[in-house]
Amino acid sequence: MFDKYIHYLLEKAEYTKDESGYIFAQVPWYQGFYSQGEDIEKARENLIDAIEGIIFLKLQNKDRKIIEEMKSFIYQDELEYA
């Protein structure tokens, strides 16, 4: 389920090129879910690392927002397959 949640976040990610030519990747509604890379593939790969790291820390700290978001996603995902 964790992988599906990350995939969901990646589908919502936005990519822009900055003035130096690097690609900036972010999930707009989450603070800290951002990265950059020389191209879209590297920016996406770095974004996955950032998302995984932050979610891990938030879960360790029992952050209610991420827990509720994940519960909501899991419930919604189960409805789609019913």
Image: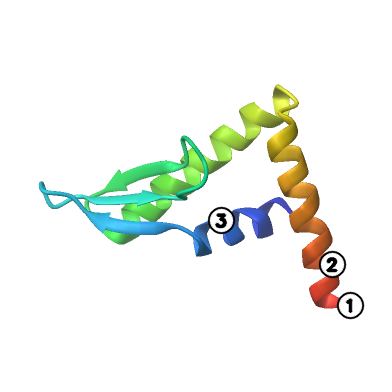
Q: Amino acid at mark 2?
A: Glu
Comes first in the chain, label 3 or label 2: 3
Q: Amino acid at mark 1?
A: Ala
Q: Position of residue 33 (x, y in %)?
A: 47, 41
The crowd level at tag 3 (other Cα within 10 Å; few <14, some 14-19, many 20+) is some
Q: CA distance from mark 2 to mark 1?
A: 6 Å
Furthest toward the top, the residue is 61
Comes first in the chain, label 1 or label 3: 3
The residue identified by callout 3 is: 9
Tags 2 and 1 in contact by the CB under 8 Å rule? yes
Q: Position of residue 69 (x, y in %)?
A: 71, 47
Given residues 68 and 21, the one toward you in this image is: 68
Residue 44, quarter of picture: bottom left
Q: Decide: is 6 above or below 49.
A: below
Q: CA distance from mark 3 to mark 2?
A: 17 Å
Residue 3, quarter of picture: bottom right
Tags 1 and 3 in contact by the CB under 8 Å rule? no
Q: Position of residue 18 (x, y in %)?
A: 18, 50
The residue identified by callout 2 is: 78
Q: Is residue 3 left or right of residue 49?
A: right
The crowd level at tag 2 (other Cα within 10 Å; few <14, some 14-19, many 20+) is few
Quadrant of the image containing the C terminus: bottom right
The numbered mark at residue 82 is 1
Q: Is residue 80 left or right of residue 26?
A: right
The residue under the point 66% across, 55% down is 5
**Total residue callouts:** 3
The crowd level at tag 1 (other Cα within 10 Å; few <14, some 14-19, many 20+) is few
Q: Secondary structure at mark 2?
A: helix
Q: Position of residue 76 (x, y in %)?
A: 79, 64
The residue under the point 11% across, 48% down is 19
